[in-house]
Image (tube, helix red, strand yellow):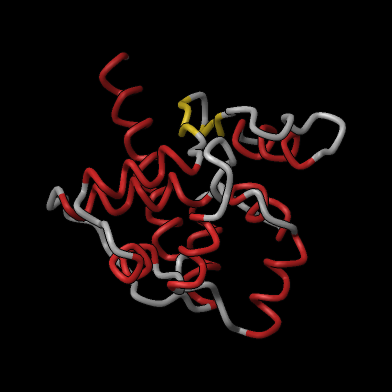
Amino acid sequence: MSIVLNAARAWRNPATAPARGTVHAMDIDDTPVPAMDKKDFFLWCDQRELRSNPEIAAAFRVSSQTIRNWQRKEEADQMPAWIPLACLAIETVAAGEPVPVAETMTVARLSEWQGRHRFKTYEDTACVFQIKRQAVHNWYKRQRFPKWLPLACLGYDVAKSRIAKDSARAA
């Protein structure tokens, strides 16, 4: 099983979870995708000229209310684990790299993505995004997926692709 799943499971375990405000990293096969706190997230957005709530909401496919809620967080509070992956996806698309960008997620698309990464259970998928297994189950049951999910999946794909390229160069 990949390190990302083990790291995410450890993070979700209350006994091994980082203390509130602790900076941690989610590892994807030995390559860190740093966690992002509120301060780092809004700095990232500002550097990319995403300054208004509607602009940020549109880029990350969430509501403006979600952005307002994030703004109310403490400076050191961690953003959702999918945010660094979405940032990686946004940067990749902005750089003009040829990557497939799905506007919406479907059962077939998510199942194909899970298969490519050998995720066999809802828990495997939940661990990547550090959410509960039940949330993934509900996505399938209701056939409704968060609008941010295609971005996060693309970010995961980009991270895995970069790892493979770096490994090939090192060999």
In the picture provided, is 138 more to the left or to the right than 71? right
How many numbered circles does the render carry?
0
Looking at the picture, does residue 22 appear above or below residue 116?
Answer: above
Q: Position of residue 102 (x, y in %)?
A: 34, 71
Task: Work out which quarter of the rendered image holds the N terminus and state it.
Answer: top right
In the picture provided, is 98 more to the left or to the right than 113? left
In the picture provided, is 91 more to the left or to the right than 67? left
Question: Residue at horizontal 66%, vertical 32%?
Answer: 7
Where residue 125 sits, quadrant-wise, is bottom right
- From this viewpoint, which residue is outermost toward the bottom? 142
Task: Work out which quarter of the rendered image holds the C terminus and state it.
Answer: top left
Question: Residue at horizontal 45%, vertical 70%?
Answer: 62
Where residue 159 sits, quadrant-wise, is top left
- From this viewpoint, which residue is outermost toward the left? 96
Looking at the picture, does residue 41 appear above or below residue 71?
Answer: above
Q: Position of residue 76 (x, y in %)?
A: 56, 35
Front position in the image: 158 or 115: 158
Question: Residue at horizontal 64%, vertical 32%?
Answer: 21
Front position in the image: 106 or 118: 106
Q: Position of residue 3 (x, y in %)?
A: 61, 31
Q: Position of residue 43 (x, y in %)?
A: 33, 41
Question: Residue at horizontal 77%, vertical 66%?
Answer: 134
Looking at the picture, does residue 80 appear above or below residue 39?
Answer: below
- From this viewpoint, which residue is outermost toward the top? 171
